Amino acid sequence: QQPQQQQPQGAGQPDGKIAVLVIACDRVTVRRCLDVLLQRITPEFEIIVSQDCGHQPTERAILEYQSRGVRLVKQPDLSTPAVEPGHAQFVGYYKIARHYKFALSEVFDRNSYDSAVIVEDDLDIAPDFFSYFLAGRKLLREDPSLWCITAWNDNGKTDQVRDSKKLYRTDFFGGLGWMLTRTLWSELREKWPRSFWDDWMREAAQRRGRASIRPEISRTRTFGRIGVSKGQFFDQHLKFILLNEDPVNFQAEDLSLLYKNTYDAAFLKEVYEDATLTTAADIQQRTSGTFRIEYTGLQQFERTAKQFGIMSDNKAGVPRTAYMGVVSFWHNARKIHLAPARPWTGYTN
């Protein structure tokens, strides 16, 4: 049975609870994830663990938390999925996409939650994780130009961030702790991909010009070196991401500045009028301040990003964390906007 598309936001669960959907498989270290979630959870949230893989030690570990309100659902199809020609080595990604579809359907279609935060079983969370997502739900309800809230900053290493209160709009879907609504799920459900679901989410056909909210300092950090990606990305990058330890009460913050009709003009003014134009070579002479370094095309972006140690790749033409093509980060005491030369005509692969 399909959910009613026209229900008002918040009409699913009578008490308006937000689901925390933990994606689990065969790692008994899910205990670490559940321990910190339960330590920090607030009354607006409920935890559901969706387990794939049929791994009994992990199932037993999850069931230890039933008495504390954690619910377990199990993905029933443990068969090996058919894969595209040449994709035999990627079968794990097909299993993950299948599991996500089951788990999201469980939360939204069968349990009628209005919104959900997706957490994989190898994530630590910040002390203000739940405050952040409670504020995020309000933003999603009030600004139709937003489609997700993410806890993650891809350029969130210790020397690249400063301000625990700072939030940004971004065109890049980050994952690694993220929120979506039932309305968005009803849009994505029928076309959900068979593999590589996160890269699929980053395609223009799904994003449809909408943005996410991300923090300057991440509210999640992964401790899972073992997984489908074999750990190389963890060793090179993920383990260096700073987890926020300076709690912010986001319910007391004025987040109206993140609405598109306010944010865009102020952001463009900061980047293209207030910031000092410089180059990657010359900025070494500057001790502090806000600067703009311009690029033309993704190849130049990649070269410049590598000079500063930020993520240099893109997905569907969108650099990680970019908004209107601009990637913002700290480098020592300098705030840098790596920005496309104007006029900017949009993202191209």
Image (cartoon, rainbow, N blue to C red):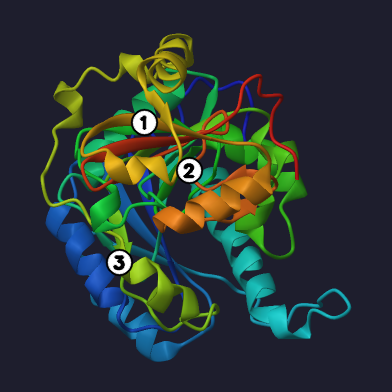
Q: Nearer the viewer, residue 214 or 80?
A: 214
Residue 17, visible in the rendered structure:
yes
Tell me if label 3 and label 1 are in contact, CB under 8 Å: no
Disc 1 and disc 2: Cα gap in Å?
17 Å
Which amino acid lies under the numbered mark 1 shown in the image of this protein? Phe
Q: Secondary structure at mark 1?
A: strand
Q: Nearer the viewer, residue 274 or 282?
A: 282
Residue 61, image x and y in percent? 29, 81
- Name the residue carrying label 2: 321
Disc 2 and disc 3: Cα gap in Å?
17 Å
Q: Secondary structure at mark 2?
A: loop
Which amino acid lies under the numbered mark 2 shown in the image of this protein? Thr
Left or right: 222 as drawn, with respect to 4 = left
Q: Residue at x 33, y 84 (%)?
A: 28
Q: Residue at x 37, y 76 (%)?
A: 224
Residue 207, image x and y in percent? 65, 36
Residue 331, image x and y in percent? 30, 47
Q: Is residue 314 above or below residue 71?
A: above
Left or right: 245 as drawn, with respect to 221 = left
User: What is the crowding at mark 3: few (fewer than 14 residues within 10 Å), some, or many (at least 20)?
Assistant: some
- Name the residue carrying label 3: 240
